[in-house]
Image (cartoon, rainbow, N blue to C red):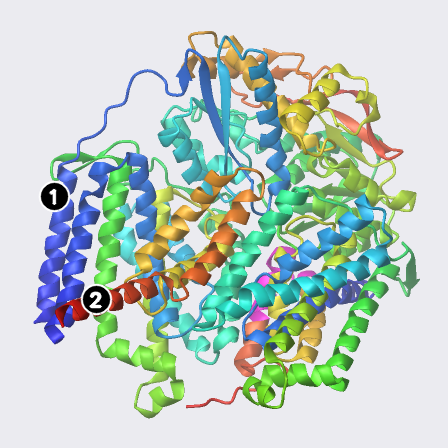
Amino acid sequence: MSLRRTLVPVVSFVALTVVVAVVPLFVSEFRAQELAYVAIYLVAIIGLNILTGYTGQISLGHGAFMAVGGYTTAILMADHGVKDIWTIPLAGLVAGAAGFLFGIPALRLSGLYLALATFAIAVSMPAVIKRFEGFTGGGTGINLFGVPELTASLTPVSILGRELSFNDWLYYLSWSIALVGYVVAWLLLRGRAGLALRAVRDSETAAQSSGVSLPRYKTLAFGVSAAYAGVAGSLFAIATTYVNPDTFPVALSILLLVGVVVGGLGSLVGLIAGAVFIQFLPTWSQEVSKSPGAPSVVSGALLIALMFVLPMGVAGLVERLRLLTRRIYHRSGS
Amino acid sequence: MADFLQQVVAGLASGSIYAALALALVLIHRATGVINFAQGEMATLSTYVAWTLTANHGWGYWPAFAFTLAVSFLGGAAVHQAIIRPNEKGSVLRVVIVTIGLLIFVNGLVTLIWGGEVRAVESPFPAGTTVIAGVAITTADIGTIAVVLGTVAALWALLQYTKLGLAMRAAAVNPAEARLVGVRVTWMLSFGWGLAAVLGAVAGMLAAPTVFLDPNLMAALLIYAFAAAVLGGIDSPVGAVVGGLTLGVGLNLIGTYVDFVGADLRLPVALLVILVVLLVKPTGIFGKSEVRRV
Amino acid sequence: MTRKLVLTLLALALLLAAGATAALAATARSSADPGVTPTSVLVGGTAPLTGPQTAYASISRGAKAYFDYVNSKGGVNGRRIDYVARDDASDPVRTVAETRRLVEQDGVFAVFNSFGTDQNLAVRDYLNQRKVPQLFAASGASTLGSETARFPYTIGLRPTYTAEGWVLGQYLARTQGAAKVGVLYENDGFGQELLAGLRRGVLRSHVKIVSVQPYDVDSFDVDAQVARLRVSGATVFAVFASPKHAAEALKYAGRLGWKPKLTVGNAAASSAPVLAAAAEKGANQLVKGMVSVAYVKDPTDPRWSKDAAMKLFHKIVARFAPGSDVSDVYLVYGMAAAWTAVEAIRRAGTDLTRQRLVDVVGSLNLKGNPFLLPGIALRTGPNDHFPIDQMLLQRWQKGAWRSFGGLWTYRGG
């Protein structure tokens, strides 16, 4: 049983990796870039899911932690000459520390009060960034296009003797990080920590009485989840080659929550679908109509319809399919 | 001193509008246990309905006002029946996402139908100003505060003194027992959604004559209303009103007297103050702490 | 045991990913400029079709309508002009994504008429390095047109915010004696640059700026700022704000009984119906006689009721953009931009390349854009990529704008 519990995810993961590795061979360079953004959103919503899906703490402010990561990368690259890929772990660390620190006062808040507290960060972030102009470039932001710290821009990058265009490079960079992040989250959540986090979500009182330290696990969840957001923000800055206060608006925080719920709360399976959804929703809805306002009408209706059809997100659908195939299998077996 | 009082008056007028929308959020939270992200956009839609009636169909302000309230009530109840109730099972976040979908949808719909241009909305109040001790108080300020307080009083009377109000409170507090004593719980909750839409419409129609009407009329207001509702205690109608007025006055005074802050940072600072309040009292000023069940 | 297995597989996966990349070869680019065929030329830009700035969506609508009109007359040099406006919801990140889509997927010949300061700045490096013309960026930020050496492919259209603020400052300096000015401005590039222009305009005059109050673009109201300006003792009220916030400020100032001399920026002046409402049927003394600047013909100005260009404007809207609000000055602005693009493409000749187009727009000297106020010329040079640097003062009289005086020309420096 234990072997099977491990084997199925590992085999599907390897299959996923192979698919991810070969996709750029079949799609245009531009499509590869769009898919790179899918990976970036994936990183962010894996992190948010650890906090919201597994620990039950609603955050409406993860865009702010992405901003911390994105600005860490941009400032390190533009002002301190650090190569882009080295800024990624640093961005994760800085955002993770910010999340951990925020998690300490947040211990006192629960439910909607916590949601407001996180929302407040997202709302305040642009104004705060503008105020510290000397550091952040103010409203104009920081442009990274063409700086030498960028591994690839218009000139292709050479890896293992082969040339990789900017878009393909972004694709492989983001997806490698997303896949590693996926495995790390999986390992974390299937172990003791995962058990403790779920106990906190299901009942804080019960968790506490069975010896789970609430402060420890809640702040841990905040820290880890913010670190993921920071890495995503860093990749966002590298991919967009530009950060400004409006790069990380309140809408981004809300969009990330949408991605988690569409993917499936408390499950890692559906998150890729969630990331695809939030990346392509604006594009799809524009294809329907370009009249002012019409893309929003389409997006909103689609989102509502999706909650009707997939109440548990894509993960719920996968689960239902799994049960269905098992039932068919058993019936044919008997 | 006159400067100070002027800011207080301006803050009370804006604050009463925050209070109306905050109260709508509180009603929804009592009925469904979520924050309705679409509350502001629904109010914007109501305001456009009123605007169309007055500007394009020659209605007077008050007939249009009354008609819009009725339409909003039905619309709010219909939203609950059609798209909220079917999504109530499972995680509470499912309903939250539905309201986010509704926010995006309604915002687009308003732009699609009426365009993105700024519209002028006729004010129901005469353009008079009274000057008391150097403080200019406009008729519109007084009218706005009066209408909001009147609406709140009416709502409070409805909830407190009528059978309907009792049934609504019962349905919100303990649906299972309410059902046992014959309360039609889902209809009561829809009624709550209808009332919330009415409050939103009041906020929108009072705000639009002063801040003008565009599809994003309520985008900023929703953040203020959310903060006001949480400051007062998300389950407390009184708290919403006090929270709204406090926030309105507080924002102005912070922007005026704390020099480092200035007008651009006043919202973050106000939110920070609210967070500190919440750390001291985690369920808001008037909120009751939840009973935790194992 | 399982952990080891996972780690091994993970390493394998990464290797695979790296291996697959090795199989890729860089795609070769064709030498001809994309987006041009013998019968068509494709241009595209971003526009706020959704989100907080949808009021400006009509710019792209007006431009599209004018191109459709030109195409119905046979196009330019035998080519039809196809114009795609993609929605960026005025979010610079989306601008980057949509602009890359236009360039890399749709293969546009040039980016045209993209809206917003931050939005245009976010893609400027990208477009210049790819040598894609960034035509007539819809923003007045000086930096878009002054760094011509670094960004030869970028060109604006409307006057800079500095120029606009400077003209208003000069007007105050010449007519208002020792006035004290209180300024309400949007706290971003747009408002800050207008304020800087105003400061330059009143330099070495008796006019003093006594109080400046910023507001954030997503603020609910600006009451607090107006109340502070009133008690600052200002005798002139300068409003550098979006149409919505400006109208609110005027209405509130009027209701407070404050009666300063009023000047408003061009953006705030754009919606005559809204200003008419702020005037409260003449009860608001403040609005009467206020002064602003203009460079585009306002469709509500009675002076243009018999003007041939404005008749054409109404005809084009009715036929190619039905349902649009004909009092919307941004429709006219969109047509003015499209007219300029058509003229530039015509002058670039039948052998249309990006380089030729950029050469033409980089040395413009064009008169007679019918949608601009009479006499305004479109001029650019090696150090100036802002075609319009002339404007007229206008005064609000009897519920409409009326221009007065001669053309003002800002010469930078």
Most prominent secondary structure in the magenta stretch? helix
- Magenta span covers which residues? B254-273
| Most foreground residue, C242 or C232 | C242
- Both labels 2 and 1 in a single chain: no
Residue nearer the viewer, C232 or A188: A188
Tell us which disc is closer to us: 2 or 1. 2
Q: Is residue B265 magenta?
A: yes
- Determine which quarter of the picture holds residue B139: bottom right
**Count of number-bearing discs:** 2
Query: Residue extending furthest bottom?
Result: A209
Residue at 54% x, 63% y is: B83
- Label 2, secondary structure: give it: helix
- Which residue bears the numbered disc 2? A328
Say which residue appears at 72% left-offset and 51% top-offset: B48
Residue in view at x 51 percent, y 48 percent: A298
| Chain to which the residue tagged by mark 2 belongs | A
> In which quadrant of the rendered image does the N terminus of chain A lie?
bottom left
The C terminus of chain A: image quadrant: bottom left
Q: Is residue B53 visible?
A: yes
| Disc 2 to disc 1, C-alpha distance | 39 Å
Q: Quadrant of residue A242?
A: top left
Determine contact: label 2, label 1, CB under 8 Å: no
Dot 1 falls on which chain? C
Q: Is residue A21 above or below residue A194?
A: above
Residue wearing tag 1 = C19
Could one spot residue A227 in this view of the protein? no
Q: Residue C192: horizontal and vertical position, in percent?
A: 62, 42
Q: Position of residue C16 (x, y in %)?
A: 12, 48
Q: Is residue B106 above or below residue B18?
A: above
Using a 10 Å C-alpha cutoff, classify the residue at mark 1 as few (fewer than 14 neighbours), some (14 to 19) or many (20 or more): some
